[in-house]
Amino acid sequence: MIIAIDGPAASGKGTLAKRIADLWGLPCLDTGLLYRAVARDVAARGFRLDDPWAALALARSINAGELCDPELRTPKVGDGASIVARMPMVRGALLAYQRNFSAQPGGAVLDGRDIGTVVCPWADAKIYVTATAEVRAKRRYNEYVCRGEPVVYEAVLADILKRDERDSSRESAPMRAAADADLLDTSELDIEAAFDAAVGLIKRKIGQ
Ligand code: DC
């Protein structure tokens, strides 16, 4: 069974994807980490983030087995990821890995921006997770505060709005709900309620 979880930054899709994967005993891939790894490597080698050839070369050489570097979670790398993610060649270079991951025996859960539309349009269940920009910014802000990182709420909100715009307006695989995705607005839901709602949607879709 393949489950696609898409949605904008800080919508809660990553947490939901992991919990859904645990429930069904499936492997889970946070595809944003692939784009984040490319952005980190481009910057670390001193290239410009909008240099398509550098980004392509590094996308082809990322070690997808090593995605636990804490630097990948920083706002700077997240911002860079949405820049390299605009490039069709970079997206193409990362596609095979994502599709191979989804093709494991038993299936997989993948979360990202284009899983239901491009990576696995044949997924058995697709959920597009949303929440207002203000709610998402508050969640992200709280995460940074918990990690002891100095941060200003307004700056987090501005970053979320900028990323939404970049991710949804790009020509190649823009962030979008698939026509057959179930929408889940988590603005007024805590994680437990969002998880219960997501499980209900998936069970209905797969006929359980
Ligand atoms: O989900 P995230 O915040 O870790 O994603 C970082 C960036 O990577 C996001 O702004 C856009 C890009 N991305 C993408 O274009 N397609 C995906 N499937 C996942 C992430």
Image: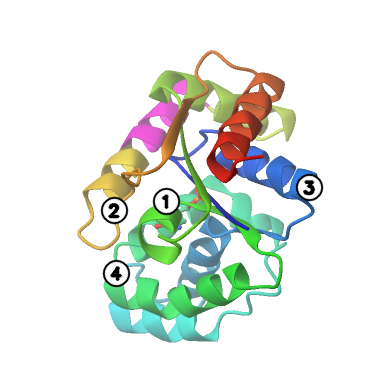
Q: Quadrant of the C terminus?
A: top right
Q: Identify the mark nearer the N-term, 1 or 4.
A: 4
Classed neighbour count for the residue bearing mark 1: other residues with Cα under 10 Å, few (<14), some (14–19), many (≥20): many
Is the Cβ of the residue at disc 4 closer than 8 Å to that at disc 3? no
> Label 2: which residue?
174
Task: Name the kind of residue labelled 4 in the image.
Answer: Met
> Label 1: which residue?
113
Of all residues, the one furthest to the top in this rendering is 188
Queried whether the magenta region covers residue 158, the answer comes back as yes
Is the Cβ of the residue at disc 1 closer than 8 Å to that at disc 2? yes
Q: Position of residue 85 (x, y in %)?
A: 37, 63
At x 73%, y 41%, the residue is: 19
Ligand 1 is found in the corner quadrant, namely: bottom left
Q: Identify the mark nearer the N-term, 4 or 2.
A: 4
Q: Toward the viewer: 34 or 180?
A: 180
Q: State yes or no: Cβ of the residue under disc 1 lies below 8 Å from any atom of ligand 1.
A: yes
Question: Which of the two discs, 2 and 3, sits closer to the camera?
Answer: 3
Question: Which of the two discs, 4 and 2, sits closer to the camera?
Answer: 2
> Label 3: which residue?
22
Question: Which of the two discs, 4 and 3, sits closer to the camera?
Answer: 3
* Magenta highlight range: 152-161
Identify the main secondary structure in magenta.
Answer: helix
CA distance for labels 4 and 2: 11 Å
Task: Name the kind of residue labelled 1 in the image.
Answer: Arg
CA distance for labels 1 and 2: 7 Å
Query: Which numbered circle lies on residue 165?
Result: none
Task: Name the kind of residue labelled 2 in the image.
Answer: Pro
CA distance for labels 2 and 3: 28 Å
Classed neighbour count for the residue bearing mark 3: other residues with Cα under 10 Å, few (<14), some (14–19), many (≥20): few
